[in-house]
Amino acid sequence: MQIEIEKQDGVAVVRALEKRIDASLSGEFKAKLLEAIREGNKRIVLDISMVEFIDSSGLGAIISGLKAVGEDGKLVVSGSTENVRSMFRLTRMDRIFSIYDTEQEAVHALTADNG
Amino acid sequence: MGCESDSRLPETADEFKNAICRHLKDTLGQYWEQAADRELFWAGSLAVRDILIEKMLQTEARYRDADAKRLYYLSMEFLIGRSLGKNLYNLGILAPFAEALQALDRDLEKIRDCERDAALGNGGLGRLAACFLDSLATMDMPGFGYGINYQYGLFKQEIDNGYQKEKLDNWLVHGSPWQIERPERACIIPIYGRIEHAQDVNGAYNPMWLDWQLIIGVPHDMLIAGYGGRSVNFLRLYSARASDEFDMQIFNRGDYIRAVERKVASETVTKVLYPADDIEAGRELRLIQEYFFVACALRDIMRRYTQKHTTFDPFTHKVAIQLNDTHPALAIAELMRMLVDEHQVPWEEAWRISCGTFAYTNHTLLAEALEKWPVELLARVLPRHLQIIYEINRRFLEQVAQKWPADNQRLRRLSLIEESSPKQVRMAHLAIVGSHTVNGVAALHSRLLKENLFPDFNALWPQKFTNKTNGITPRRWLLKANPHLSRLISAHIGRGWVRDLERLRDLEPLAADAGFRADFERIKRRNKEHLAAVIFETTRVRVDPGSLFDIQAKRIHEYKRQLLKVMSIVQRYLAIVEQSRLPQVVRTFIFAGKAAPGYTAAKRMIKLINSVAQTVNRDPRVKGLLKVVFIPDYRVSLAEKIIPAADLSEQISTAGKEASGTGNMKFALNGALTVGTLDGANIEIMEEVGAENIFIFGLRAEQIRQMRARGTYNPWDYYLADEDIRQVVDAFAGKRFCPDEPGLFRPVFDALLHQGDVYFHLADFGPYIETERRIDDGFADKAAWTRKAVLNVARMGKFSSDRTISEYAHDIWNLKPVQ
């Protein structure tokens, strides 16, 4: 599972660089996401614009990330394709995440939120 | 630039010949001189399919332009049968197609026999669905079937030493020219998983359905041509597939076996049709089947709707969904889930939309046949849907409690949840609560539904219950199945009856016309000769086409009382061999029907019929007086040969048990007289054809209900009082019909006498035998018999499925033709 992490204005942008996040990759995905959080990143934009398909284990990994940032942190999602967004709707996960169309919008929202 | 096709569709025999040869060569890689009949069947079917596709596209454009309301008929079963002949008739291309085959030195009948039946159903319910699709297309209505593309249809029945043996019906082993796979319309269906009770960004309760597994649903369309070919609709059948790409990931990690196992497990979902009366085994798979196909259907419906509409306000003006029995009732919970969870429609609004969309057809009065699912199973397979069902129930019971305060018993009776051990979800209750209309399928059945099966619901919502008496399509069941009679009818009254069956009334005066009757008799004789040949081919028993063909062809079930028919045969046989009482009329008793593989009593019945047949047919004392045959593997294409050959149609179920029956309609439409009880649609057939043109006998539903309630029925009373009954019933206890296995039929004797004769055989036996005598008398007077037969045909107009569909469209769906 390839991911890329880039800091922008105090926000960690985590880019998932796979077309599919499913059972074969979700364990690694979750580990890398949690590692990034453990390293002190509490304001995270998870960019999934490259992801065309995500299954329930992939969604589970993202929820683990949300839980790990805790109440004082923030994890938002950007760039979800229609397929992935439909999976968020199916699980009602769209109601616990802020979802932005683009990475820039998401970063902007988190930095603005910072004051 | 568009993508206009310039290939002209065939119309003349020459053009069909060219189209067939083109498909033989270009699609199948074969020259016609070397082609086998099956290849000709394929090439011919593909030539016909070209026309169907063109017309389907035109029809779809018409519906789309009109933004027409669409009806989606959700059914676990569509008993389609064969398609080539039906398409040739409905598209009006039979003659040029047959001529084209002739030019290729082939015979249409032989080519048609290459087609395997699409046996995607058990019996009446599935065949009704198929007849409805024909009527919807014929009447230019946007109505579409949604179901399952079973790899194995209903089992093939073979008879081995008198016993039924089930064989796999791998009907798709060579593919089907009629199916169009549409992978681009595949949908993703989640099952299993758990609910995580979370809060949304606003702090509101947000149940999340997580850890599910996915199955892919791939649609396969079968195109349904209406008569005249103006409208072509589709039946969309889903096959389950594993997600290929998902498997690729596992492949890549080298876990080949796990990948294959997962693929097989996913694809099992649509492997096999469950036989009726036999769904105990593997119930989890059956539940998944039911959910899988409604989930696929609703995604497709929603996709089509949201292409045109951005809000759900007009949903009920654009979508109607009919639930054919409770098997698709999970669609109610699924639509609610989609609206509430995926589209964030408030619950009350979603419920209004859902109730305005669904209607439910009940098909049974047998309380034990009403579907229930253990709560524990639903919680595991569909945890979110169970939550939704509980919420529907909570709100519904509040409504009940408002109407009947402090009536806990009523709450318990009406609840969607049966507080039994284990707890179960009552699917019929879900279907009733979530539908705007509930219908039975014959007048008596609809009345008994309200009075006996669902009295509390009727008290709550009397306006919700209605009747829609079943019907049959005259295109398959007369025009195609009985071409000679069709031609005779059309020669006298024109062809209008094919679209408007009430026009058959114009035949009535011809019942008195000796010339017409003679033609009618000749055709019946010809059909009987044809069936006699089929019987000889399949059973090696020779039957006399001059004898009275007395036929009971239907699923084998105790309530349908094949046993009562066998008892009458035994009585007739014993009268000849023991009392030398010769019958007035020579009869051939013909049975056909399948028994559910796990239904012991029904399978024993098949053995009994075959054993009686063996004894009778080998006994020189009855030679030329009676014959008994069981034709194996009853299916639509066989029914089309059996029904036109019948003189007498046996519809002798225990009154109050048969919801409607449609076989009764098919036989009568083809000029058989009916002997029957006042059950199901028999009552309405009697009203139409006249009591003097049908043989009615036996206890009425109300009498049976009272006898049951008061405990006044004792079969011993009949046994001890009637010598005939004693002789017949004792014959089952002894070895007369099972000399090599004494006691084989003792359970039949025990069921009749020691287990209370649940289906009232002994009570109805005397009146039945008396009626049989009247039938013999009647058949002996050929002119009078034929007169009645003609009047039966003339007065069957009500039972066209076009009439049934018109009523559904007007009263339930608010669906209009789009011309």
Image: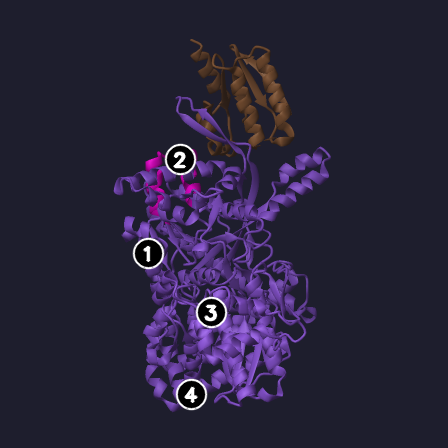
Chain colours: A brown, B purple
Q: Is residue B341 magenta?
A: yes
> Would you name the residue on which mark 1 appears?
B450
Q: Which residues are magenta?
A: B332-358
- Under circle 1, the secondary element is helix
Identify the mark nearer the N-term, 2 or 1: 2
Q: Label 3: chain?
A: B
Residue beneath the point at 42% across and 56% down? B59
> Would you name the residue on which mark 4 appears?
B777
In front: label 4 or label 2: 4
In the foreground, B161 or B734: B734
| In contact (CB < 8 Å): disc 4 and disc 2 | no
Q: Identify which amino acid the numbered label 1 is placed on.
A: Lys
Q: Judge from the rendering whether residue B58 lies leftward or rightward of residue A2; answer left or right.
A: left
> Would you name the residue on which mark 3 appears?
B476
> Would you name the residue on which mark 2 appears?
B340
In the foreground, B350 or B103: B350
